[in-house]
Structures are given as structure tokens and as C-alpha cells.
Amino acid sequence: MKEILVPIILLVVLGGFFGALIAYLSKVLYVEVDTRVQDVLGMLPGINCGACGHPGCAGLAEAIVSGKGTPEQCRPGKQEMRDRIKTYLAQVSKELQEEKAK
């Protein structure tokens, strides 16, 4: 009985320790995600054709938000989509500037 109890206790203690360690490190090493990239990605057609020169729509969305790309690079996208992305980015930029001014 004692022979099986020691490994069980050891596994429970190690599992608890590593679980607590993972929970702590997930808080310390948390990387904040830029929601603008996801919003722009949702506005793109989602074809992932690569015609824009980026690895799919996610790559183009990151480039647009960082200022290294433009909505015009999306060849399958329509002008309405491009205008919507530009309007969204202008609005978010204005909101960020207002927050910084406070």
C-alpha cells in the first residue's frame, strides 16, 4: 500500500506546483493583443489568396494596422471594404489621440 501511495502523493504535489507555476507565468508573460488587427481582418474578404503580397488576410491586416500596408493592396476587395477600413482606422486613431490628450 505504501509503495503506491508515495508516487501518487508525489504526482499530486508536482501537478499542483507546475499548475501554479503555469498560472503565475501566464500573468507575468501576458502579451496584449491589438484588437485593431482582428477588426481589420474581419473587414477583409478572407480569401487568403496572397495577391496582396502578404501571407493571407491576417498578414495584410497586420501590415495595414502597422502602417506598412494599405487596403488597396487587397485585389479581391471592393472599394466599399477599403473605405470601411480607412474610416475605422481614422476613427480609432482619433480616439487614441483623445485618450492621450487627457
Image: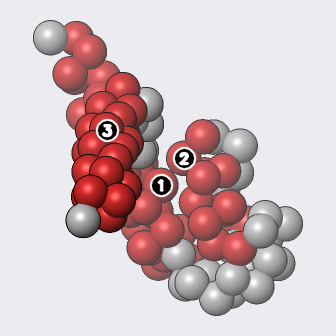
Amino acid at the residue labelled 3: Phe
Point out the tag, 3 or 2, that comes first from the N-terminus: 3
Task: Please tell me which residue is depicted at 24% across the width and 65% down the height of the picture.
Answer: 1
Q: On residue 17, which mark appears?
A: 3
Counting the numbered discs, the total is 3
Spot the residue most to the left: 102
Cβ–Cβ under 8 Å for marks 2 and 1: yes
Q: Secondary structure at mark 1?
A: helix
Q: Horizontal and vertical percent for residue 42?
A: 42, 73
Task: Please tell me which residue is depicted at 26% across the width and 15% down the height of the picture.
Answer: 100
Residue 76 in sight here: yes
Residue 32 in sight here: no
Q: Secondary structure at mark 3?
A: helix
Q: Is residue 101 above or below residue 51?
A: above
Cβ–Cβ under 8 Å for marks 3 and 1: no
Q: Which residue is mark 1?
A: 37
Q: Is residue 61 above or below residue 100?
A: below
Q: On residue 90, which mark appears?
A: none
Can you tell which quarter of the image residue 45 is in?
A: bottom right
5 and 32: which is toward the camera: 5
Q: Which residue is mark 2?
A: 65
Task: Please tell me which residue is depicted at 66% across the width and 62% down the height of the picture.
Answer: 60
43 vs 58, left or right, is left
15 and 80: which is toward the camera: 15
Cβ–Cβ under 8 Å for marks 3 and 2: no
82 vs 42, left or right, is right
Amino acid at the residue labelled 2: Val
Can you tell which quarter of the image residue 38 is in?
A: bottom left
15 vs 95, left or right, is right
